[in-house]
Image (cartoon, helix red, strand yellow):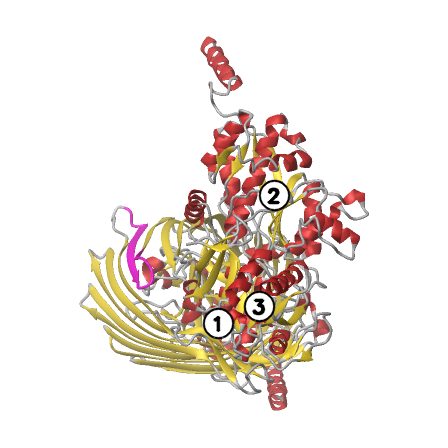
Amino acid sequence: MYSSRLLLVVLWTLSSFAFAQPAADAGVSAVVPTPEAATPASSAPPPIDDSSEEAMFALEEVWTTKVVTASGGVEEDALSAAANVFTVTRQDLNRRGYRSLAEVLSQVPGLFVVDDLVVPSVNVRGVSGGLRAGSRIIKVMIDGQEVSYRPELTAFLGPEFIPLDLVERVEIAKGPLSAIYGANAFLATVNVITRKPTGATGTVLLRHQRLNATNFWGQPGTAVQATAGWGSEKLSLLAGVHAEQADRSGLTVTQSFPEQRPDSPAFRNFFRGPSQQDLATPLSGFFTATLTPSTSTSLSLQAGLQVLDSMAEFRTPSSVLTHASRVAYRNAYGQLKWQQAVGDRFSFSLQAGLSQGEPTRDLRLLLSDHLESSYTQNDGYLAFDVAGLASYRLLDRFTLTAGVDFTNETHDVLFFTQRFNQAQGAFLPGDVQDIIGADERRVEVLRNFGVRLEGSGAPFTALPGLTLSAGVRADFPNLFNWQPSARLAAAYRWSPSFSTKLILGRAFQTPSATMLFARPGFGNSNNLVGNRVQATEAPVQPQVVTSVEAVASAKVGERLLLDGAAYFQRVDNVVFFKKVGSNFVATNRGDSSVVGVELNAKLAFDWVLPYVQLSSQLVLPNQDRPEASFAAEGFPAFVAAVGTDVRAPKAYLQGNVQVRVVGPRGATQANVEFNNLKPYTLPTYVLVDLGVSSLGLSPFGGSFEPQLGLTVKNLLDARPAQPHSGGYDLPSLGRTVQLDVRFSL
Amino acid sequence: MQRTTVVSAVLAVSFAFGFGCGAPMKPTKTVKIGVIIDRTGNNAEPSWSDAVKLAEKHANAALTKAGKDYRLSYELNNSQNDPATAVQQATALVQGGARALIVDSSQNDVAVNKLHYDADMGNDLNVPIMCGGCTAGTINNPNATATDMVDQATNRNALGWNFRGIMASRLVAKVLVKEMLKTANGDANGDGKFKLALYGSDEAFGRATLGDLRSFANALHPTPLPTYKEIRHGATVDANATSWATDTAKLVEQTETPTDGGMPVADGTTPDYVVVANFSAQQAATVRAYKTGMYTPKMFHVHTFRINNVITTLGALAEGSEGVSHVLIDNAEAGDLFKSEFEKEYGKPIAYRDATYYDIAMMFALGVMNAAQTQTDVDKLTGTEVRDAVRKLSDPAGDVVKTGADELGKALTAFGAGKAVNYLGASSPMDFDANQTVRSKLARYKVENGKFVDAAKFDCVTNDDCNALP
C-alpha cells in the first residue's frame, strides 16, 4: 500500500514537471489508435487529431456515430440503426474519469443504477429488475459475446468487468432486442466495443482515490491498470489487466419510510452504525487477438477473467453490517469467431463461446448479530454457446440475414453450507453442513435453441433515405414454452440534418437459474427460494416486453444537436419477488405499462460542448396500481443533467462538469410491505461531478504521453438513499476524489 | 336547431332514468372493512390477504348484480404480528371509517379487543373484530381468569365485539395427545414413562396451547401422570438467533420442569415427544436447530407449522415433519368452489387458513348486507349494527348460503325477503356458538415432497371427541 503511494507521488511529480513544459508539437503525442470497424468489411471513422482545429468539438463527430449493436455486428450509421443507441466513446471515458461500466451506465438517459456496493443493479425505463437485480433485465456483451454470471443473469459491472482503457466505446441499445440476441436482450443491450490497435500501444494507469471524502479526506483506494496492444494489417493483439482496492466504509442506513422504526426488532439491525472494513478488491483481465489473413477472412479469439471480491455490508437484510460478510466470485469467458466473406454478396460467421463461473474460497456470509456460524454459497455454471450466421446482400440495397444458435448451461444449484464457529447441537467448531437434502438435485441444465431471420437495408431507390429493418426470432428454451421475438424499424433521413425512426419490438426474459432453483439456508429468513423448488406460488414464466418507440434527431446549424425519443412499453408477466413469509420467491404479477421521453441537446462551441439531458416516464395505472405514477418502483420520476465537456488541446486540458438532478424514486414493493402497504418515494437529490485531465502532454517527445487527471464525483457529498428490499433502503457513496496518472504509448 | 333540442331531451331523459329500466344504479358509497394481517413478520402468509380480496371481489360482484348502491372495500394492513402495530392500525382504520376489523393472531386479537376494556373509554373501537389465527383457548372464554382484570375481561368478551373465526387450539392439543398415545400409550422410548417436552412462545397463543397439551395429556394419561419439560421463549426472538439451538438442546435433557414451573430437576428420562407451539418463522427455526442437533425424540407441531413460510425457509429440512392443524377446506361444495375460484384467480394452490380468512371476509360481507337492509344509508351503518347482523348468520333455520358471488346474491335476495341465512363456509360451518367461536375439522398432516399432505382427518364439529373421519 505504502509503496504504491510512494510510486504515485513520484509519478505525480514527474507528470507535473511534464505539465509545466508542454511539447512543442502536441500532435505527435496524440497516440489515439484509429478505431477500426467491428467487422472486417466495415469502414472506420477518421481519427481525431486533438491538436488541430478539428479538436474543437464538431457536431459531425456525434452526428455520424457508427454503431454495431442494433444490427448484430455490422457497422452502420447510428441514425439509421434499428434501435435507439446511446454511445459513450473512449474520449468520454477518459474525460469523465469513469471507474467502471456501472458508472458509465449510470449516466445514460433511461437507465438508473442502484449500487448495493457488491453488484450494481440496472433499472431501465421505469422497470426494475427486482431483488438483487444486477443486470438481469439487460444483456451485457463484450464485442458481441454475452459476458455475465449466468446463474444470476448478471454482469459484474464494477471495475472487474473489463479494464476500461481497452474500451473503444460502449453502445447502449435501448428497447427490446431479443429478435437479434435472444433471451434477456430485454429492455436494453449493452455492448462494450474494445479498441483495435494500430501499431504498438500501451497504457499504465495509477489511480488513487478517496471515497466518502468528507472534507476531501475519506477512505483510501488504489487502482492499477495496464494495457498493451499491437496491430498490423493481418494481426491485432490487445490485452489488459486492472486491479483495485477501495474502502467504502463509513456509510449508514437512514430511516426512509415512516413504519421503519429504528428501535423495533424488525429494523434495528439496519441502524447499528456505519459500515466498517468495507473493502472491495476487484480484478479484471482481458485478451483479444484478431487474425485477418485476407480481406475476406477474419479469425478472432477473446478471453477474459473477472474477479468480484467485495465485502457485503448492505447486500442482504439478514447480513447487514456484519463487517465480515464477503462476496467473491470468479467468472471467465472466451470466444472463438470465424468471419468469412464469399464473393461480394455472401458472408457467414461461426462462433463458439465457453464461460464458467463460481464463488471463490473467499466467499463467506455471516448473519447480523449471530456470528456463531458462517455460510458459503454453492453455485456456479459452465456454459457453451455456438452460433452461426449467414448474410446475403440483395440488389446492393438489402441484406438478408439468417442465424441459428444454441446454448447449454450446466448450473450448480445454489445452496448454502454452514460452518460452525462454535459447538451447536451435534456439530463441533469447524464442522460443516450442506443445507440441501440428500435426494435433491444439485445440478440443473438450461438449454436454448434459437433461430432468427432478418432483412434490412434501403429497398426503394426512389426513397434512398428510408432504411427498413424487420426481424423475427424463435427461441426454444428447455424449461419454458417457445418464445417469439420480433423487431420492425423504419428510419428516414428527411434531410442531411434531420432524421427520424420508428421502432417496434418484442422481447422476453427467462427467469435465472437462481430464481428457479435456489435453496434456502442462509439463516431462517430473507432467502431467495427457487420458484421451482417450492409449492407456494405458480410456476414463474418468462416476462415479455412489447414496445414502440419514435426517435428524432436534428442538427440545427453547425452547433446544435437535438435528439429525442418517446416510447411506450408494456411488460407482461412481470417477474417480481414476492415475500412469502420470511423469504422471497420469484413469481409473475400482471402487466406494467410505461410511456416515457428522453431528450438530449448538445451545443458544439469550439472547445466546449455543453449538453442537457432529460428523461422521464409515466407508469400507467393497472389492476395493482390504480393511479398513474412518475416514480416507478426503484426508478426516478425524472433525471435531468446539465453539463459541459471541455477539450482545449492548446491549454493541454480536457474535462467535464455536470450537475445531475435525480427525482423521487419509488420504493420497492418489498419495502412497501414493510411500510404497511403504503407506497413511498425517496427524495430528490443533486449530484455534481467534476473532472479535469491533461491532454496532449508529451514532455519526453515521441509517442509517450503522460496524463494527469483529477475527478471529483458527488462534489456536494449528497447521501441519498436508493431503493432496496428487505426493510431498508441503500446508502450511497459520498464525495469521491480520484487522482489518475496515466502513461500512454 | 330543432333536431339538437330533441336529441338533448332524449339524452337528458335517458340519464334521468339510468339508461332504461333495470339498469344497475351507479355505486357511490363504500363500506370499509379493516384487515390487519401479518405480511412480513414471524407469522406471515401473504396468501391470506389474497383470500380476503377474493371475498371482496365476490361480494362486490353480488352487490353489482343486485343493483345495490354501495360496495365493500377491504383495507389491507401489515400487522407484522406485533400487537402494538395492530392496535395502531386498528385505531387508524376505525377512525378512517372501517365498520369491522379482521385481525390475525391471538396476541393481536387480544391487544385490539382490549381497547374495549381498558380504562380509556376514548379508545373504544366499537366495531366487530373477527380473527383468523387466534387459537388461544383463553379467547372468548367466559370462564377465563387472569391476574390482570383487563386481560380477564378481554378474554371473557362480555361486550361481544370479538368473534373467533377459527377453532381454538384446545382440540388440536387433544388430537395430538391422542395420536401420541397410539404408540405404546405414549411411552415411545420404552422407558416406562410418558414424558412430553413442550416448547412455545411466551404470549397468548403459546401459553394457552402448552397449557391445553398438559391438560389433555393429564386427562388422557392419568396413571401415571405424564412428566414435562417446558420451555417458553420470547415472542419476538429473531429467527436467526442461536437460542433455538440452546433451547432445543435443553428440551431433550434428562430433566423435568416441576409443576410449579420452577427450575428443572434431573429425572433420568428423555422425552417421548417434543411438541412445538410458536409462530411459523419460529417453528422453522426450531426444526432447523433440532435437526442440527440430531435429536431423536419425535417432534410434533401444531397448526402454526402448516404455513408455507416454514417450507420455503426449511426446504428439505422440513421433510417428514408432522403435526395437527385445521383442515384446509371443508363442506364439499363450499370448500371446492372456494378452492377452484381461488386457484383460478391467483394461479396457485390454496394455503392453510386461506379458507378461514375468506370465510371471515364473507361473514362481514354478509353482515354488512344484512344490516344494510334495515339501514337505508350505508354511510350511517354502525359497528353495532354489523356485529348484531353477523350474529344472525348462523341460523339453522335460515337459507343455506355457501361460498362464491352467486351465493351472496342468494343471501341478498333472502335478506330482501326478510329471511335469515346460515352461511356454510369453506373452512368450517362457521356456526358461532354463544361465545362467538366456531368449530371445525382437524387434520393430521405431514410434509412430503415439499408439500403438506393430510394423513388423517378428525371431526371436531360434532363434538369434542374429535373422532377420526373415514
Left or right of residue B273: residue A276:
right
* Tag 3 secondary structure: strand
Q: Position of residue B102 (x, y in %)?
A: 61, 46
Cα gap from disc 2 to disc 3, whole angstroms = 29 Å
Q: Is residue A208 visible?
A: no
Cα gap from disc 1 to disc 3, whole angstroms = 17 Å
Indicate the quadrant where residue B209 lies: bottom right
The stretch drawn in magenta includes residue A128: no
Query: Given contact means CB atoms under 8 Å apart, are the residues at marks 1 and 3 in contact?
Result: no
Q: Is residue A520 visible?
A: yes
Q: Position of residue B155 (x, y in %)?
A: 70, 51
Q: Position of residue A37 (x, y in %)?
A: 34, 69
In the picture of the structure, the residue carrying the numbered disc 1 is B317
In the picture of the structure, the residue carrying the numbered disc 3 is B275
Please report, as a chain letter, where disc 1 is located. Answer: B
Left or right of residue A348: residue A105:
right
- Give, as a three-letter code, the residue at label 3: Val
- Choose mark 2 or mark 1, whichever is in front: 2
The span shown in magenta is A463-483
- Choose mark 2 or mark 3, whichever is in front: 2
N-term mark: 2 or 3: 3
In the picture of the structure, the residue carrying the numbered disc 2 is B433
* Tag 2 secondary structure: loop
